[in-house]
Image (cartoon, grey):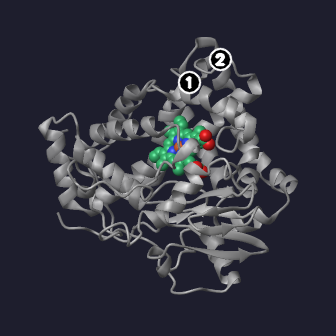
């Protein structure tokens, strides 16, 4: 199966002045990586008096995320500043004893969670079936809405309909717009109270929309809310918003990437359709397409940590207070670890293909803070893609391509208009 190279941003060559780097970062965090970084072991630089180290060797990644996870337990203050107005001390940005107390609770609740997934996917299939062949679909909005519905149903149980999901997806998009794009670097540099002030309006609207859903779920004993009974009201709200915000954005990113990639690669699409027609319940090609989508477009393209004390990582001295970054975006396209790294080749994840080297493929992070939604996200994405691709395909429209960019999460495009096609006439 030949490879196809889907869109990625241009890469500059060599080092560039800090001001230029910051200007790039404020446009998109995918634009800051030079050509050489996709071949080298990492780099360190001082930006505005702060030591930044980008680790891109497997040994260094293992140290930061796993064996020295206690030294690198804290996420950058800038991240908390941007997310705290929305999720308070929710798990994603919680630290220390608070994180330690909550992680097992939430992880336990997520362990076998699948609430309502089949129902949401059935509604989604019915929605597409009601549209005519050739109907326009805006991929990004459609995936955000569908994944909001999946997540809300998971968290709050029955009683969450597609209209509520659309409204929350809209509010979440507004918050996300506030913390990405040209304003991001300025926002990061502002003191916390000012950032809070700027973001509180959007955050409050989300809190207000979620509150009745929590109350309803508490009454009816639905969803994950029912599996987190010990949490006081404020902590529960923080936790469900943290789960929703993390899960919804990343799942919609994965689904959008999978549909976009399939539309670019007819051979892969045909192999996926053949697998779905064969009734092979294991669906190795469907899973390989999703894994490859996560490699090429990792929804969380960059992870940051702060060194709590001076230490050494893979032979490199790391001063106390340094910001350590690990970039799935970089590792997943690193020439030392992947053949034809920028090509879409799901066959690399089929059973029997060599496994990726340890610590080079990390779409869900690694170590004690790895994603606790991984199993759910993979299951939900596989179930959704398999059910929908059985009956529909999405077709690219000339002049509308992806132009990937990233703030805290990766986005293929602001909007990506496509066309819905029925696979069988009358289907
Ligand atoms: C394709 C889907 C997803 C991807 C790629 C993804 C990716 C990640 C990554 C990379 C991290 C670690 C960040 C770090 O170490 O700094 C993370 C953490 C987290 N994810 Fe996910 N995620 C996905 C879906 C979900 C879902 C569905 C949920 C919840 C329903 C979720 C909830 C969380 C939470 C709560 C954390 C923080 C864990 C902690 O700090 O202890 N994620 N995710």
x 44%, y 76%: residue: 39
Which quadrant of the view contains residue 44? bottom right
The mark that comes first in sequence, 1 or 2, is: 1
The C terminus lies in quadrant: top left
Q: Is the CB of mark 1 within 8 Å of ligand 1?
A: yes
Query: How many residues crowd mark 1 within 10 Å: few (<14), some (14–19), many (20+)?
Result: many
Position of residue 314 relative to residue 66, above or below, is below
The secondary structure type at the circle numbered 2 is: loop
> Where does residue 54 sit, x and y in percent of width and height?
59, 68
Seen from the viewer's position, the closer of residues 386 and 13 is 13
Image quarter for ligand 1: top right
Q: Is residue 397 left or right of residue 167?
A: left
> Where does residue 420 sit, x and y in percent of width and height?
30, 50
The residue to which callout 1 is attached is 224
> Where does residue 185 sit, x and y in percent of width and height?
72, 67
Residue 286 badge: none
> Where does residue 352 sit, x and y in percent of width and height?
20, 50
Seen from the viewer's position, the closer of residues 212 and 24 is 24
Residue 229 badge: 2
Position of residue 101 relative to residue 391, above or below, is above
Q: Is residue 289 left or right of residue 237?
A: left
The CA distance from mark 1 to mark 2 is 9 Å
Is residue 36 among the parts visible in the rendering? yes
Q: Is residue 156 left or right of residue 339?
A: right
x 62%, y 71%: residue: 27
Query: How many residues crowd mark 2 within 10 Å: few (<14), some (14–19), many (20+)?
Result: some
Position of residue 77 relative to residue 172, above or below, is below
The N terminus lies in quadrant: bottom left
């Amino acid at each position: 199966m030949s490879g196809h190279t889907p869109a990625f941003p241009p890469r500059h060559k060599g080092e560039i002045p800090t001001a230029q780097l910051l200007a790039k970062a404020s446009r998109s965090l995918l634009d800051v990586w030079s050509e050489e970084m996709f071949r080298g072991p990492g780099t360190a630089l001082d930006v505005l008096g702060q030591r930044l180290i980008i680790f891109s060797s497997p040994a260094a990644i293992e140290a930061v995320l796993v064996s020295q996870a206690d030294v690198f337990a804290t996420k950058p203050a800038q991240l908390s500043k941007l997310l705290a107005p929305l999720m308070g001390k929710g798990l994603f940005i919680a630290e220390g004893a608070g994180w330690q107390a909550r992680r097992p609770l939430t992880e336990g609740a997520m362990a076998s969670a699948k609430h309502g997934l089949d129902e949401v996917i059935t509604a989604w299939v019915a929605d597409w079936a009601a549209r005519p062949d050739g109907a326009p679909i805006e991929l990004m909005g459609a995936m955000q809405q569908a994944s909001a519905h999946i997540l809300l149903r998971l968290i709050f149980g029955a009683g969450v309909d597609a209209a509520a999901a659309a409204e929350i997806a809209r509010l979440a998009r507004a918050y996300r717009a506030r913390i990405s794009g040209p304003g991001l670097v300025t926002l990061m540099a502002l003191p916390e109270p000012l950032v809070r002030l700027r973001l509180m309006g959007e955050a409050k609207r989300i809190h207000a929309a979620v509150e009745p859903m929590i109350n309803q779920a508490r009454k009816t004993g639905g969803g994950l809310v029912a599996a987190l009974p010990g949490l006081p009201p404020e902590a529960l709200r923080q936790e469900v918003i943290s789960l929703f915000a993390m899960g919804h954005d990343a799942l919609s990113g994965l689904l959008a990437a999978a549909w976009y990639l399939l539309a670019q690669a007819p051979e892969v699409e045909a192999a996926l359709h053949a697998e779905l027609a064969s009734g092979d319940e294991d669906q190795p090609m469907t899973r390989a397409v999703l894994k490859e989508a996560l490699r090429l477009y990792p929804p969380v393209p960059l992870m940051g940590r702060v060194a709590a004390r001076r230490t050494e990582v893979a032979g490199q001295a790391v001063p106390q207070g340094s910001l350590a970054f690990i970039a799935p975006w970089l590792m997943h396209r690193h020439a030392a670890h992947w053949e034809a790294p920028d090509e879409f080749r799901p066959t690399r994840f089929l059973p029997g293909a060599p496994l990726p080297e340890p610590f080079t493929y990390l779409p869900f992070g690694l170590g004690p803070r790895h994603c606790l939604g991984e199993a759910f996200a993979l299951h939900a994405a596989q179930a959704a893609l398999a059910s929908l691709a059985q009956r529909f395909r999405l077709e690219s429209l000339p002049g509308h391509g992806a132009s990937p960019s990233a703030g805290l999460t990766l986005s293929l495009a602001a909007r990506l208009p496509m066309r819905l096609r029925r696979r069988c006439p009358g289907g």
